[in-house]
Amino acid sequence: MKKGIFIILVIIAIVLLGNSAYTVDSREHAIVTRFGEVQKVIVKPSNYDTVINTISSSERYLSVSVSTKVGLHFKVPFIEHVEKFENRLITYKTAPRQVTTFDKKILILSNNAQWQIVDPLLFRVTMKNTNQASLRLDDILYSEINVQVGKTDAHTLIADKVYIEAMSEQIVQDVNKEMIKYGIEVIDNRILKTDLHESNILNIYARMEAERKQKAQQYRSEGEEEKLKIISGADKDAAIMISEAQKEAEILKGEGDALAAQIYSQAYSADPEFYEFYRTLEMYKDTLTGTTMVIDESSPLFKYLFQ
């Protein structure tokens, strides 16, 4: 009899212990409720202040305790219950959707968002579960995407990766202004794929081709302008060099003429008669080359040649 009672008590103790003990690991948030009312919140240290702010903002939660301890915890068996929520990043990939750009082009966007629960207390009250949260995120995310896309032309969205990166960051900031109300923070948002709607493909690529041709023409014009500058500079340098060479030649010619005159003068002083003979020969050579000449006895040349 006593042995049977002991066994029953042991079984009851095991059941009570099993229902009162629970564990929380580093990948989880946990909320302990009693008759549906939150009694305790267990979060990772980085989210502690966020939960404290939520508690202090509502009299309903003033009695709620907050812990950052992971591992083994205890609760009142059968009366208190534990709800656990993921505290790691959750990936949400949207289905492709149509958006309209500033220049009235239709694009098909695929989107990928990374989000996490930063306030499990607020999340439990507003969202209940991740499926509900994903639906709400989808609405808010695409609303903000439509706003940003509506400010941008299609060509930029297709070709400008730097702009898309900046736009994604702005979308995250705007989305978080709404999602923080649900205890959620979006960490990252990426536009995975941008496809042209069939009606826009030809127009977009025609515009891209025209812009590239315009750019190529600009480069050619700039190259031609630079070529003319180089040629002009070379011509100017050549003219300066020629002018300096001519000036130098004139100087040398003048020096040569002066030296020749000096030599002539010295020759005349040494032998005036021979100098006169030489000058006469030079005169006839310059004036009568290629002709036949009859020399008269009265000619100065006759005197030098025959007397």
Image (cartoon, rainbow, N blue to C red):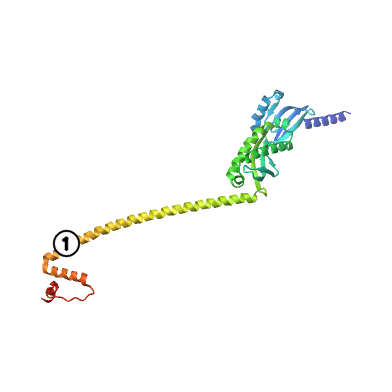
Rendered residue at 44%/52% (across/down): 226
Q: Is residue 180 left or right of residue 227?
A: right
Observer able to see residue 75: no
Disc 1 residue type (three-letter): Gln
- Which quadrant would residue 263 be assigned to in this image? bottom left
Name the spot of residue 242 as percent of width and height, x first. Answer: 32, 57
Rendered residue at 19%/63% (across/down): 260
Q: Is residue 3 left or right of residue 208?
A: right
Name the spot of residue 299 as percent of width and height, x first. Answer: 13, 73
Q: Nearer the viewer, residue 126 or 25?
A: 126
Eyeballing the image, is 282 above or below 37? below
Q: Nearer the viewer, residue 274 or 170?
A: 274
Eyeballing the image, is 225 above or below 262? above
- Which quadrant would residue 111 be assigned to in this image? top right
Q: Residue furthest left?
A: 307
Eyeballing the image, is 190 above or below 250? above
Rendered residue at 49%/53% (across/down): 220
Q: Nearer the viewer, residue 19 or 35?
A: 35
- Mark 1 = which residue? 262
Say which quadrant the N terminus sits in: top right
- Which quadrant would residue 60 be assigned to in this image? top right
